[in-house]
């Protein structure tokens, strides 16, 4: 769990200092006051990752020094992240020479937000991102393989746009794509096998209905990436872009045999998004042997009492939870949230609620 959180020049906060009990905390306030940024700071501290942006400079406070710092006691370690054109990382005062070293003994995170509906309604990229965030926490080498694959893909695509593509160079980058991409396909296959039964149980528990949830991993290059690249070679040269590989994979979601994005009701889609995140938490705990911290951004206030109470029943009681909400009307009638601190957030300042 996370006991303290400190931040400087992060988003709307010039400075931030919190002590959090074992159960977690609830942050209340109107929209655009900084509640979500607190959860984002936790995610960056623990996983060097923001669920809101891939652009690190976007997290720097406007009018600040062009960088930010986040620190805190997490899983009985003092962890520190500084960014000023590049990351500076330390654990218990000892510098870490890279993200892999920093993350190797870090904790686990599950982020839950209303934007999770895009897992059902949105593009395949959103669902790949979901698998990548899990894979980076439970699969050794996943994050490295993904970074190497992306670099090789970018280089290949640049070469394909030349009027006379340099075939030898393209093939050299394809070899990297094959080796790293094959690792990603194998890992994603295992992840979906791990998540699928857990998501099915959560779907039934949250919906209160016997709904059959289906998850099917669809690798864009199949399970033989070398063969897929050979078959796509002429098309890729003609259209000057890459068509096969893990960057085009998808996770197909269905309810009772029908595509969820097209045929599920809004309530079913919302429940499915919750089920995927609940399954993520169970999968992380099963593989790593420790509970993740749940960062829950403005979700409970939007749920009807039945779904809200069902989610609270499914969430591990011993897990620490950081929850944001615009109002407290639902909180006092909800079981399972005892022992949590309460804070009010307004215009980048925090007070006890």
Image (cartoon, rainbow, N blue to C red):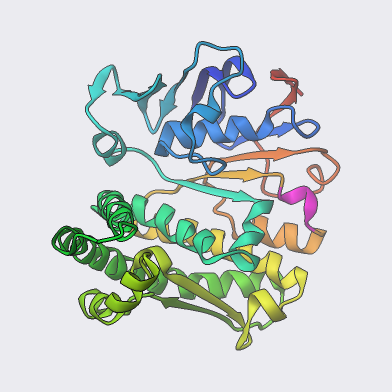
Which x, y percent locates residue 192? 41, 71
Which x, y percent locates residue 226? 21, 75
Residue 124 to residue 44: above or below: below
* Residue shown at 52% from the left, 46% from the top: 319
The reply, left or right, for residue 11 in relation to residue 144 is right
**Which quadrant is home to the C terminus?**
top right
* Residue shown at 58% from the left, 19% from the top: 61
Residue placed most toward the observer, 154 or 246: 154
Which x, y percent locates residue 131? 43, 61
Which x, y percent locates residue 320? 54, 41
Residue stretch in magenta: 299-303
The image quarter containing residue 123 is bottom right
Residue placed most toward the observer, 292 or 184: 184
Residue placed most toward the observer, 265 or 154: 154
| Residue 274 visible at all | no
Tell me if residue 246 is in the magenta stretch: no
* Residue shown at 49% from the left, 36% from the top: 55
Residue 303 to residue 207: above or below: above
Residue 327 to residue 179: above or below: above
User: Outermost residue toward the bottom?
Assistant: 257
The reply, left or right, for residue 117 in relation to residue 130 is right
């Amino acid at each position: 769990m996370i006991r303290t959180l400190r931040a400087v020049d992060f988003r709307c906060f010039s400075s931030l200092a919190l002590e959090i009990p074992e159960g977690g905390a609830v942050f209340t306030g109107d929209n655009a006051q900084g509640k979500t940024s607190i959860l984002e700071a936790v995610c960056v501290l623990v996983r060097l990752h923001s669920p809101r942006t891939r652009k690190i400079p976007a997290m720097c406070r406007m009018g600040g020094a062009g960088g930010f710092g986040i620190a805190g006691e997490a899983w009985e370690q003092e962890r520190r992240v500084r960014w000023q054109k590049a990351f500076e990382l330390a654990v218990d005062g000892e510098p870490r020479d890279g993200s892999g070293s920093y993350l190797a003994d870090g904790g686990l995170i599950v982020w839950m937000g209303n934007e999770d509906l895009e897992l059902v309604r949105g593009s395949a990229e959103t669902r790949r991102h979901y698998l990548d965030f899990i894979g980076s926490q439970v699969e050794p080498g996943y994050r490295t393989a993904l970074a190497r694959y992306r670099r090789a893909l970018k280089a290949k695509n640049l070469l394909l746009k030349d009027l006379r593509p340099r075939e030898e160079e393209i093939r050299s980058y394809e070899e990297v794509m094959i080796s790293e991409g094959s690792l990603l396909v194998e890992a994603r296959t295992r992840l979906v096998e791990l998540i699928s039964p857990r998501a099915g149980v959560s779907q039934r528990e949250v919906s209160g209905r016997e709904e059959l949830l289906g998850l099917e991993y669809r690798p864009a290059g199949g399970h033989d990436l070398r063969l897929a690249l050979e078959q796509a070679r002429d098309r890729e040269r003609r259209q000057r872009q890459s068509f096969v590989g893990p960057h085009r994979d998808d996770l197909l979601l269905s309810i009772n045999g029908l595509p969820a994005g097209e045929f599920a009701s809004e309530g079913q889609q919302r429940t499915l998004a919750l089920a995927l995140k609940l399954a993520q938490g169970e999968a992380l705990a099963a593989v790593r042997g420790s509970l993740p911290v749940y960062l829950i951004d403005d979700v409970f206030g939007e749920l009807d009492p039945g779904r809200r109470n069902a989610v609270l029943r499914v969430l591990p009681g011993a897990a620490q939870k950081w929850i944001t909400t615009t109002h407290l009307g639902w909180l006092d009638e909800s079981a399972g949230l005892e022992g949590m601190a309460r804070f009010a957030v307004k215009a980048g300042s925090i007070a006890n609620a």
